[in-house]
Amino acid sequence: MIPFFSRDLRIEWGQCDPAGIVYAPRYLDMFGENTIRLFEHAGLPKKKIMLEEMNVAGFPMVDVAARFLKPAAYGDDVVVETAAPDFGNSSFKIHHRLVRNGEICVECTETRVWTVPDSERPGGLRAARVPDMVRECFSRPAGNEEG
């Protein structure tokens, strides 16, 4: 995996179980936030503005897989790395990993779907093709990190 976006993070107590080890669902929170920041890093507006101005209702997760290789614990300084999306038509996969001291602790793959309001069902949503302008934002070389 070649990171397109990464950020430094310190594991907080609220992310941990009573033993001080990261509670597995909190990794999904970390990776979900990286997904949002990945889109901003690529040049798209903040998600709140995307929702207001781009006729997108969001990009909900429809599948997730994770491998837990090493525990991370309270106070650890880690890096959350995220690759550019692999786009299908309306869905896309995003690969993440959490790294501590150069060692991979967790790998995760999310499948998300670009959704828009459904004009035929008031309040409903439907999948839509990921816009070309969104795809183009990820065509530049990887390696630009927030750090």
Image (cartoon, grey):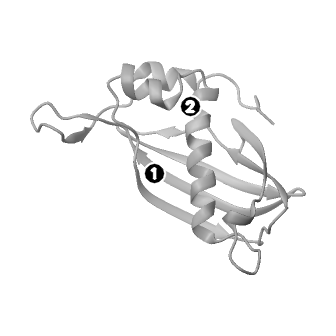
Q: Amino acid at mark 1?
A: Thr
Residue at the right extreme of this rendering? 101
Q: Residue at x 55, y 46 (%)?
A: 94
Which disc number belongs to residue 39?
Answer: 2
Q: Amino acid at mark 2?
A: Phe
Q: Quadrant of the C terminus?
A: top right
**Count of residue discs:** 2
Q: Position of residue 33 (x, y in %)?
A: 59, 45
- Find the distance from the CA under tag 2 to the CA under tag 1: 15 Å
Name the image quarter holding residue 146.
Answer: top right
Which disc number belongs to residue 133?
Answer: none
Q: Nearer the viewer, mark 2 or mark 1?
A: 2
Callout 1: few (<14), some (14-19), or many (20+) C-alpha neighbours within 10 Å?
some
Name the image quarter holding residue 68.
Answer: bottom right
Q: Position of residue 123 (x, y in %)?
A: 18, 39
Q: Secondary structure at mark 1?
A: strand
Vertical arrangement, residue 134 with respect to residue 6, above or below = above
Q: Residue at x 75, y 41 (%)?
A: 7
Looking at marks 2 and 1 on the same chain, the residue that comes earlier in the sequence is marked by: 2
Q: Nearer the viewer, residue 7 or 97?
A: 7
Callout 2: few (<14), some (14-19), or many (20+) C-alpha neighbours within 10 Å?
many
Q: Secondary structure at mark 2?
A: helix
Vertical arrangement, residue 24 with respect to residue 79, above or below = below
Could you tell whether 99 is left or right of 109 in the image? right
Q: Position of residue 93 (x, y in %)?
A: 50, 47
Q: Position of residue 20 (x, y in %)?
A: 77, 75
Vertical arrangement, residue 126 with respect to residue 102, above or below = above
Please give the residue where the numbered disc 1 appears in the rendered image. Answer: 111
